[in-house]
Amino acid sequence: MNQVGCKIVKNRVPPPLWMVLTGALMWLVDRVTPAFHFSVPYLVETRTLVTLVGVAFVVVAIIQFAKLKTTVNPLEPHKSTSLSTDGVYRITRNPMYLGLAIMLLGWGIHLGNPLNLVCITGFMVLITKWQIKPEEAALRDLFGKEFDDYCRRVRRWI
């Protein structure tokens, strides 16, 4: 195992905290740019549906990890005991992070400011660079060719 790779992941802010910070930034963007507001038909239903889809991705992924008895801690991927490639992991290699981004989209719909799409994109770029890539390096060290084959079959986000 590459010890440097482990240190990189261990020193990172947990992804749910990045989501909360991004949500706060979205709120701030909304407050300082009121001219960009738009209304969404069926606002409550739309934001609720989008948010629930995001929550579903996260919950289903956590359940899959629990069934495999492997770590769900994103700061310790080197403790993974198996590679999850079924279920939601056939759609995306990162359903938990995709779920967080979808939940942010629900928040953005609630706020009604299209500038918040920039914040969500920033969240995805940040998570990819500081969380996903170090995780992938650790998983590659652990699972080798099996992980590389999985990466060829399934995209990082969607």
Image: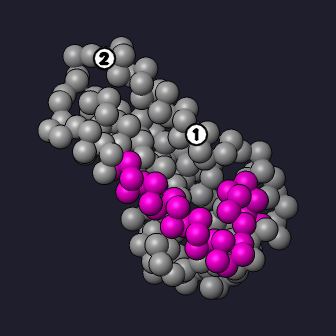
In this rendered view, identify the residue nearer to me: 74 or 11: 74
CA gap, disc 2 to disc 1? 22 Å
Q: Note whether 67 is above or below 51 in the view shown.
A: below
- The quarter of the picture where residue 82 lies is bottom right
Q: Which residue is mark 2?
A: 33
Q: Name the residue located 17 percent from the left edge and 40 percent from the top edge.
A: 42
Instruction: Give the number of callouts.
Output: 2
Residue 107 x, y percent position in the rendering = 38, 37
First to last magenta residue range: 50-78
Q: Is residue 140 magenta?
A: no
Horizontally, residue 35 falls left or right of residue 135, namely left
Whichever of callouts 2 and 1 sits on the residue coming sooner in the sequence is 1
Q: Note whether 81 is above or below 131 in the view shown.
A: below
Horizontally, residue 26 falls left or right of residue 129, namely left
Dot 2 amino acid type: Thr
Q: Name the residue located 49 percent from the left edge and 42 percent from the top edge.
A: 123
- Can you name the residue that lies furthest to the left here? 41
Residue 18 tag number: 1
Q: Secondary structure at mark 1?
A: helix
Residue 131 x, y percent position in the rendering = 63, 52
Q: Name the residue located 78 percent from the left edge and 50 percent from the top edge.
A: 10
Question: Would residue 132 be visible to someone looking at this image?
Answer: yes
- The quarter of the picture where residue 13 lies is top right
Residue 16 x, y percent position in the rendering = 59, 44
- Give the position of the N terminus as an image quadrant: bottom right
Question: Would residue 156 be visible to someone looking at this image?
Answer: no
- Give the position of the C terminus as an image quadrant: bottom left
